Amino acid sequence: SGGDHPTARRDTHFQLEGPIVDTLKQAFIQSWNAFGDTLPAVKPKQKTGITPIYSATRGPLRMTAAGKTYIDLIESATKTINLTTGYFNPNYRVIGALQRAADQGVAITILTNGRYSTHHFALEAGKVFYTPLLKHGIQIAEYQPTMIHAKSMTIDGQRSYVGSANLNFRSFYHDEEFSLVIDSPQLAVALDRGFKDDLKQSQFIKLEEWRRRPLKQKLMQYIYVIGHYFY
């Protein structure tokens, strides 16, 4: 979904059917019961090839399952990583995992928001991390038509990570998230096809040009990044 007008977000929706629905129900029940009420548990009837990642807040500086899964999947890649995130504000563990993967020959492309976003501070803070990624040959593209709200990542055209978790501190340390790791080349190919279409409407960041951005812009980004733990 999406549109040409900035108020229409670019998103990706999924419809899940079959035994995985029981897993989704159990994740909802687990979250609901954490607040005092008690709903009966639901046990999935069979394996599905889909791994649910329910991510609850664990306290200050303790990374959630969402962040750990991002790192595990990045480290498992051998060929390609195509990553879409509405909010780009990674921690240094994720940056390190991406750099190491790129150094080992993995082709990595990150698609995130350009000028449109619901949180200007978070948007600008994340750009501080462009340089250390670009220096390792990682491609970064900013979507131009409107705001991206999608969160997805494909690994080697075989596995996909989709759901509510962004590549940012809020998803890594604060928010409850639910995502899925799906072993399906068919889904990965479909997501990669949409990813390539989005790249045609995006602006790629070039390292030398990025280094020459105005000093005021650099200073403001470093000021914003001071509070990035809360973005």
Image: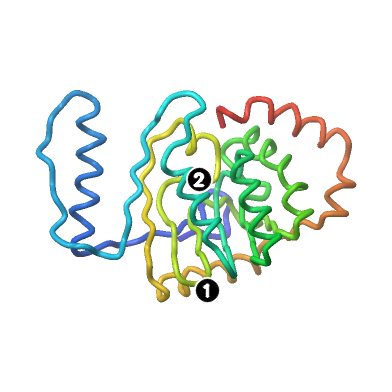
Q: Nearer the viewer, residue 118 or 206?
A: 206
Q: Position of residue 32 (x, y in %)?
A: 22, 33
Q: Name the amino acid type tagged 1.
A: Arg
Q: Secondary structure at mark 2?
A: loop
User: In the picture, residue 45 is in which quadrant?
Assistant: bottom left
User: In the picture, residue 80 is in which quadrant?
Assistant: bottom right
Residue at (26% x, 35% y) in the render: 31
Mark pair 2, 1: CA separation: 20 Å
Q: Residue furthest left?
A: 40
Residue at (44% x, 44% y) in the render: 66
Quarter holding the N terminus is bottom left
Q: Nearer the viewer, residue 186 or 67?
A: 67
Report the residue marked by disc 2.
166
Report the residue marked by disc 1.
193
Q: Nearer the viewer, residue 167 or 215?
A: 167
Q: Give left or right: position of 50 versus 45.
A: right
Q: Position of residue 47 (x, y in %)?
A: 22, 62
